[in-house]
Amino acid sequence: MNVDNKISEYYDKLLKRNAGEPEFHQAVSEVLDSLKIVLGKDPHYADYGLVERLCEPERQLIFRVPWIDDNGQVQVNRGFRVQFNSALGPYKGGLRFHPSVNLGIIKFLGFEQIFKNSLTGLPIGGGKGGSDFDPKGKSELEIMRFCQSFMTELHRHIGEYRDVPAGDIGVGGREIGFLFGQYRRLANQHESGVLTGKGLTWGGSLVRTEATGYGTVYLTAEMMRTHGEALSGAKVIVSGSGNVAIYAAAKAQEHGATVVAMSDSSGYILTPEGVDVDLLKDIKENRRERINSYAQEAGVKFVEGGNIWEVEADVALPCATQNELDGESAQLLKNNGVRYVAEGANMPCTPDAVHVFREAGIAFAPGKAANAGGVATSALEMQQNASRDSWSFAYTDERLKQIMTRIFVNVSTTAAEYDREGDYVAGANIAGFKKVADAMLAQGVI
Ligand code: NDP
């Protein structure tokens, strides 16, 4: 059977075994597409059921999370942890608290994480977790009680050498604090390496908060340099206004770009003169308000329910959520002159959008490469925890920058090696895959 047929047959089986998980199908389909190129050249990567094993999580945990709200009512949420692949190191990946969370979403994120973590060059496997808990509108005590209940089950499945969760949508420094406190209490030890994204006085790393957004911009700058352009003077759209978006906007402006629009799920703001990052941080991080407050306080326009991708720009950084940028929006970007897109979020661009970018010659960096700075810095946090050390901001930031540059060079040279010059999707999938695949083949059928 030829490679294309083999992969199609395998994908059909996967669809049947994982029914009702469209995001997981989407993530696998994209990787399998790139694997056709690898298997055509290096057929041994199909040996020992490697592809089938790669797409099947090593372990999937689903658990009840009961907690008591401020009115004394019992609430029940569902918790997940998908421990996808530990061939390269302990499972590593964030926890997402959002009402849209289900097993398929966590599996898509965990699957992507395998390749992303491989690309960082650091010894970390892939995993992801979370809950359908909605932190919006909850009091701090409700969030604390939820986190404590979530960790009461999760604690028996994680550990410095086993599985090291971090934050994601809805899980920031405050939530990591509550989760770590409960872990420490249950495990009866201060095992700082069990979670990353910790506070700076109890094992956290400088730059971790900024890392994903900064990393996306470092990689974008490198990509633009390769194409003979620079961020300085460029107009940039950054979707979202959470952790990734804020620091992507901050770093893009440090590079001399102007961030012309940002958003949340209620609409977008137009900021033709650039974003006041200090004001944005105060509104989002301290006061936990919506992007609309920024518009009111900064006196800029807020477009309620609008599509941020209709704004004119040179660079687009989708930093909010999966499938936020579809084919139609990609057409808008193309018509408005966007030449570079880098995914700060996980899988924000639909396959149709990626197709439009490819046809239009728009340079496109997929999330596996472009947002790997967060997990890379988490791995640097683990290194500091293991050596009981803490590094300076400048040193850690420099390490992050080097990692992001190395990722881009690896992705770009791998694409060229497989006759896909400029196809950073193929480059990221192939480079990420080969390292994990070599480790899995060396470790036998497990
Ligand atoms: P946050 O919870 O801090 O922020 C998410 C932001 O996205 C919020 O502004 C939210 O707005 C907005 N958003 C969510 N859904 C939509 C939507 N449908 N349309 C427009 N805006 C929306 O999460 P993070 O910044 O941590 O994560 C963002 C993305 O980056 C996710 O895909 C995550 O998986 C990915 N990522 C995060 C990493 C990290 O280190 N944090 C690492 C690597 C990837 P609202 O408040 O209205 O919901």
Image (tube, rainbow, N blue to C red):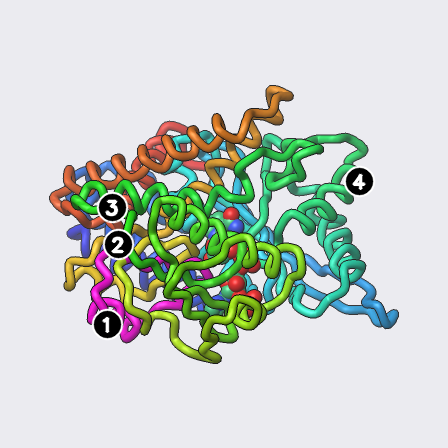
Task: Find the distance from the CA under tag 3 to the CA under tag 1.
Answer: 23 Å
Observer-nearest of 430 and 223:
223
Q: Residue 253: x, y in percent?
A: 39, 50
Helix, strand or loop at label 4? It is: helix
Q: Which residue is drawn at 52% across and 75% down?
A: 266
Whether residue 239 is in magenta: the answer is no
Q: Mark 4 points at which residue?
A: 186
Task: Find the distance from the CA under tag 4 to the CA under tag 3.
Answer: 50 Å
Helix, strand or loop at label 1? It is: helix
Task: Find the distance from the CA under tag 2 to the CA under tag 4.
Answer: 45 Å
Task: Find the distance from the CA under tag 1 to the CA under tag 2.
Answer: 14 Å
Task: Find the distance from the CA under tag 1 to the CA under tag 4.
Answer: 52 Å
Q: How many badges with numbers are in the image? A: 4
Question: Given the image, on which type of amino acid does mark 1 rest?
Answer: Gln
Q: Name the residue under label 1.
A: 331
Magenta residue span: 315-339
Q: Nearer the viewer, mark 1 or mark 4?
A: 1
Task: Find the distance from the CA under tag 2 to the CA under tag 3.
Answer: 15 Å
Q: Residue at x 63, y 39 (%)?
A: 195
Q: Residue at x 39, y 34 (%)?
A: 401
Which numbered dot is residue 354?
A: none
Q: Name the residue under label 2.
A: 364
Residue 221 appearing in the image: yes
Question: Given the image, on which type of amino acid does mark 2 rest?
Answer: Phe
Say left or right for 210 vs 313: right
Helix, strand or loop at label 2? It is: strand
Q: Mark 3 points at which residue?
A: 230
Q: Nearer the viewer, mark 2 or mark 3?
A: 3
